[in-house]
Image (tube, rainbow, N blue to C red):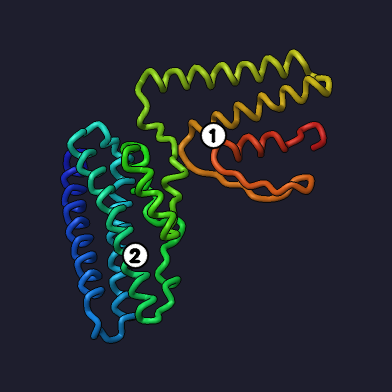
Amino acid sequence: MNKTTALLNMQDELNSCNMIRRDCLTSISELMNDDQVKDCETIINYKDKEFLQCVNMLDSIVTKSSLLECYRHESWMNALIDSSIDMLEDIIIFYKYIYILSNKHKVNKNKFHPSNSFATNIQRIVAINRADVLSSIQQRFVQLRLPIGGFTNRMFDLRRLTTIEKLIMVIFVLVAATTIIVVAARFPNPSSFQYLVFRILLSSYAGIFGFILPGTIKIEGKYNGFAIRASGAVSLFILVYLCNPPIL
């Protein structure tokens, strides 16, 4: 399948997703105005699952769009970003209604609370491309206690780099590797102070590599009585710094 065909397929999926999203919001709005509804919990549960499928569909489209480097297609990206903003706005409305209905009909609203990975990529594409609406949307997500992982953990996308930027990174990697080899050969038995400096530099290099490379890593634990919790580049810095080769 070539990129043009993939784009057409994703466009169809996006149109379908937008249609389902609007239908879900219309249905839950009508439910808000119906005081005679019976078995509200079953209906809410059904609508919640339907809406989650729609959110996951758009989240998947955002992921595929990134993998196919579709950011080069301006019209497609504008449509995808606009749909993502609309989705986030509708998520706020949908769950506000869900929580109101749950309280009204004495249903446990926590059972409808989405997981931590909810709408992560949708949040990321808006956070990266539309800073003008980010603060407002994120604030309302926080007020409803909805997950905000995509707003706060924006993965660095290597595919968005230009050729010059990639070349600069390759040069940096080569310089860093050469520096480490030269230092190791020049100072086979470093003093305590030199070892501390080398340790910090090596940890810094590892942190920078962690920022460059795609993917996520998280660490959590205790060290000398202190609780440690970190993710991304910082977690790699800590892992390398806490590793003590001379005593291994």
Image quarter where the C terminus lies is top right
When the figure is inspected, residue 79 is found, relative to residue 168, above or below; the finding is below
**Residue 36, located in which quarter of the rendered image?**
bottom left
Residue 32 versus residue 217: which sits nearer the camera?
32
When the figure is inspected, residue 135 is found, relative to residue 21, above or below; the finding is above
Could one spot residue 2 in this view of the protein? no
Q: CA distance from mark 1 to mark 2?
A: 37 Å
232 relative position to 36: left or right: right
* Residue, disc 2: 96
Circle 2 packing at 10 Å, graded few (<14), some (14-19), many (20+), is few
* Residue, disc 1: 210
User: In the image, what residue occupies the spot 37% across and 70% down?
Assistant: 99
When the figure is inspected, residue 57 is found, relative to residue 82, above or below; the finding is below
User: In the image, what residue occupies the spot 47% across and 22% down?
Assistant: 169
Residue 30 screen position, x and y as percent: 20, 73
Residue 235 screen position, x and y as percent: 60, 40
When the figure is inspected, residue 17 is found, relative to residue 41, above or below; the finding is above
User: In the image, what residue occupies the spot 30% across and 61% down?
Assistant: 93
Residue 56 versus residue 22: which sits nearer the camera?
22
**Residue 100, located in which quarter of the rendered image?**
bottom left
Image quarter where the N terminus lies is top left
Residue 122 screen position, x and y as percent: 34, 48
Residue 7: image tag: none
What's the residue type where badge 2 is placed?
Answer: Lys
